[in-house]
Image (cartoon, rainbow, N blue to C red):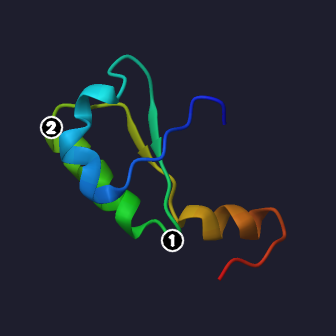
Amino acid sequence: MEEAQLIPMQQFPHRLGELPEDRDIYLVCAHGVRSYRVAEYLLANGFDRVINVDGGMAAVAMLRGFQYD
């Protein structure tokens, strides 16, 4: 993903200014728990185009036929 950014969960409060307000923000982590929490945080801070990838990379891998531990 060309425009993807890696932002660790604990850095989000300090890096909100780097996030676009005019397009969707997809959040992904290993199993979807941390990205869900970040999505809730962003929504509470005025971002309304936030999408959590349910199940995280584990779910994406399973859809593509891979096992993700």
Q: Amino acid at mark 2?
A: Asn
Quarter of the image for residue 3 reads top right
Quarter of the image for residue 45 reads top left
The one nearer the camera, 11 or 51, is 11
Query: Where is 26 relative to 33, above or below?
Result: above
Q: Residue at x 73, y 66 (%)?
A: 61
Query: Where is 4 relative to 36, above or below?
Result: above
Q: Is 23 displayed left or right of 58 in the figure?
A: left
Q: Secondary structure at mark 1?
A: loop
Task: Residue at the far bottom: name it.
Answer: 69
Q: Amino acid at mark 1?
A: His
Q: Residue 55: x and y, percent? A: 53, 67
Task: Residue at the far top: name it.
Answer: 22
Instruction: Specify few, some or many for label 1: CA neighbours under 10 Å numbering under 14, 14-19, or 20 or more.
Output: some
Query: Where is 44 relative to 21, above or below?
Result: below
Quarter of the image containing the N terminus?
A: top right
Q: Is 12 displayed left or right of 52 in the figure?
A: left
Q: Residue 30: x and y, percent? A: 53, 68
Query: Which residue does the numbered mark 1 point to in the structure image?
Result: 31
Which disc number belongs to residue 49?
Answer: none
Query: Which residue does the numbered mark 2 point to in the structure image?
Result: 45
Q: Residue 44: x and y, percent? A: 15, 43
Query: Where is 58 relative to 5, above or below?
Result: below
